[in-house]
């Protein structure tokens, strides 16, 4: 990211499509697995294909779980899959605080109890100009926030990732400053597209993807989608965000996907869909990653070149 960007060529790029299992079949099967209790401790109802989902072809489970960014576990794309297995994700406690009616240290299952687990198939666009389509399972963040009771002074939501030096080799390096933190404006957090994801393809969230619970904000660059969350705070002022703090010239607080605003070191006009094969054509990047109809009104009157 801020200090490291290389042209990636991974085994998934040169492996023939046919080597991957039938994605649609897996998708169908995975729904069943979830109904059969795929998410441990969650008895919540599962709604299937959903009005917020794209009908674009999802990436394979292998692609989604072997090509990752999770710097706590190393900086190369294979590191998280290799190293994150050592993280213990149960029991898991989330501290909810700040301007909320019901602050506290919540066991994850208690925090999610009573909330619908939905399947949302979202486009996912990394600031490094690659993309995937990912069938997430999770709860709408607005429902979680309603449950803990947002107070009227709250304007932003701040999130924090666990720091587990015993298993996270990456946190021994000083850059970025740990813990990984992120934030959203309250109206962004309350938008129905914003998800607290707890699974992929109906299986519990793999550790490398941010188990047991990570944020997903599909119209923003992937680094806003903070993983393995241990703290959620409702606050008055714009909270710090890791890459924005590390290099504010290159990474804005908003980080809405925008093909018209280049990263200082590369264009954001096109993207490479992971799994398309090495010779696949790059595809055009869409404003707000294709979610403009739903979210453009959140930014009315804002200069998106200034608030990038
Ligand atoms: N969250 C934490 N805690 N640490 C990270 O390094 N990387 C971000 C985001 N969330 C990151 C993180 C970036 S740059 C991206 S693109 C996505 O996670 C990648 O999510 P994925 O590996 O599930 O595709």
Image (spheres, rainbow, N blue to C red):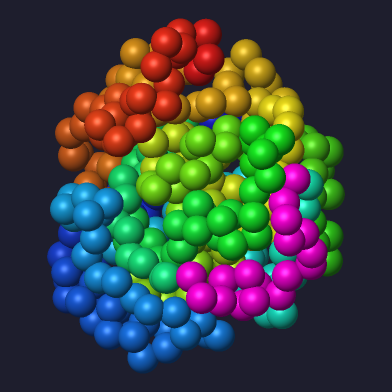
Q: Specify the quadrant that holds the N terminus.
A: top right
Q: Quadrant of residue 157 in the image?
A: top right
Q: Is residue 7 above or below residue 74?
A: above
Q: Nearer the viewer, residue 123 or 172?
A: 123
**Residue 210 can be seen in this image:** no
Q: Residue 222, image x and y in percent? A: 48, 41
Q: Nearer the viewer, residue 101 or 269?
A: 101
Q: Is residue 29 above or below residue 14?
A: below
Q: Inspect the magenta stretch and tell me whether residue 136 lies in it.
A: no
Looking at the rendering, the stretch of residues picked out in magenta corresponds to 99-115
- Residue sitting at 50 percent across and 17 percent down? 308
**Residue 191 can be seen in this image:** yes
Q: Is residue 6 above or below residue 247?
A: below
Please identify the residue farthest to the front as the structure is shown.
152
- Residue sitting at 78 percent across and 47 percent down? 98
- Residue sitting at 45 percent across and 57 percent down? 140
Q: Residue 133, image x and y in percent? A: 30, 51
Q: Is residue 270 above or below residue 153?
A: above
Q: Nearer the viewer, residue 178 or 52?
A: 52
- Residue sitting at 79 percent across and 67 percent down? 105
Q: Residue 237, image x and y in percent? A: 73, 28
Q: Residue 244, image x and y in percent? A: 65, 26
């Amino acid at each position: 990211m801020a200090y490291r960007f290389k042209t990636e060529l991974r085994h998934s790029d040169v492996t023939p499509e046919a080597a991957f299992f039938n994605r649609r079949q897996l998708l169908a099967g995975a729904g069943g697995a979830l109904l059969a209790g795929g998410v441990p401790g969650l008895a919540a109802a599962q709604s299937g294909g959903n009005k917020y989902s794209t009908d674009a072809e999802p990436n394979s489970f292998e692609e989604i779980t072997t090509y990752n960014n999770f710097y706590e576990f190393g900086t190369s794309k294979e590191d998280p899959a290799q190293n994150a297995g050592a993280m213990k994700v149960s029991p898991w406690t989330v501290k909810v605080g700040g301007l909320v009616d019901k602050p506290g240290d919540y066991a994850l299952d208690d925090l999610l109890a009573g909330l619908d687990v939905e399947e949302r198939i979202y486009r996912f666009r990394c600031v490094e100009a690659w993309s995937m389509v990912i069938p997430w399972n999770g709860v709408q963040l607005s429902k979680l926030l309603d449950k803990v009771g947002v107070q009227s002074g709250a304007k932003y939501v701040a999130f924090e990732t666990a720091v587990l030096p015993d298993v996270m080799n990456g946190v021994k390096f000083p850059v970025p400053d740990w813990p990984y933190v992120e934030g959203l404006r309250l109206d962004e957090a309350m938008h129905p597209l914003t998800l607290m994801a707890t699974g992929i393809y109906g299986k519990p969230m793999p550790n490398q993807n941010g188990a047991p619970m990570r944020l997903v904000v599909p119209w923003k660059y992937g680094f806003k989608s903070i993983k393995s969350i241990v703290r959620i705070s409702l606050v008055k002022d714009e909270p710090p965000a890791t890459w924005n703090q590390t290099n504010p010239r290159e990474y804005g607080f908003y980080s809405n996907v925008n093909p018209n605003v280049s990263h200082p070191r590369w264009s954001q006009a096109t993207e490479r869909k992971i799994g398309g094969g090495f010779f696949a054509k790059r595809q055009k990047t869409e404003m707000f990653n294709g979610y403009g109809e739903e979210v453009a009104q959140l930014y009315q009157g804002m200069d998106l070149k200034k608030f990038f």
